[in-house]
Amino acid sequence: MLKIFAAFLCAIFLSFNLVTDNAWATGQFSQTCKNISVNGSTLTASCQKADGRTPSTTSIDLNPHIANLDGTLDWDGDKFALTCNNIGLAGASRLRAECKTADGDTLGTYINLDEHVTNIDGTLKFE
């Protein structure tokens, strides 16, 4: 009976680890990172490693992943920083910027970084 109970506990523990690892691989970096900041197109944060305790300072350049589509930040493209100014954060995971439209106007726009930026063992990654 004790062996069955021990096997049951091991199965639960292993299942929890798999769920935790998968959660870290689906965006939501802001749930496991702190001291989040943006400088130009570079996102920097102190993120937990898989052990849950060890912080790691990490950065990712968002410019290869985000576009300015007629004044709106969008995941479908790149090089948003070439046509956007006043880039910063609104909260922990919303990137804000003032981006030029095709006709030369400027619009304030936001994009949720938690949609595609993830923390993989203390390192920010795009997915």
Image (cartoon, rainbow, N blue to C red):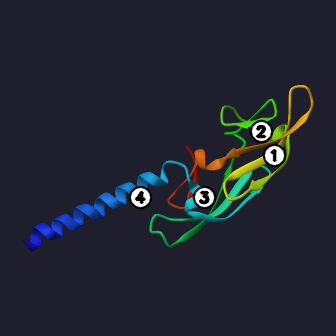
Specify the label residue 30 is tagged with. 3
Q: How far apart are marks 3 and 4 (CA)?
A: 15 Å
Q: Is mark 2 on a helix, strand or loop?
A: helix
Q: Distance between the residues labelled 4 and 2?
A: 32 Å
Q: What element carries label 4?
A: helix
Task: Tell me if residue 48 can be seen.
Answer: yes
Q: Distance between the residues labelled 1 and 4?
A: 32 Å
27 relative position to 23: left or right: right
Q: Residue at x 82, y 34 (%)?
A: 71
Q: How crowded is mark 2: few (under 14 residues within 10 Å), some or many (20 or more)?
A: many
Residue labelled with disc 1: 97
Q: Give residue 30's position: percent from left, percent from top.
A: 60, 58
**Which numbered mark, 1 or 2, is in the foreground of this view?**
1
**In the image, is residue 84 above or below residue 38?**
above
**Which numbered mark, 4 or 2, is in the foreground of this view?**
4
Q: Give residue 52's position: percent from left, percent from top.
A: 47, 69
**In the image, is residue 80 above or below residue 43?**
above
Q: How far apart are marks 2 and 3 (CA)?
A: 21 Å
- Name the kind of residue labelled 1 in the image: Ala
Specify the label residue 20 is tagged with. 4
- Name the kind of residue labelled 2 in the image: Phe
Specify the label residue 80 is tagged with. 2
- Name the kind of residue labelled 4 in the image: Thr
Q: How crowded is mark 4: few (under 14 residues within 10 Å), some or many (20 or more)?
A: few
Q: Is mark 3 on a helix, strand or loop?
A: helix
Residue farthest toward the top in the current orientation of the protein: 103
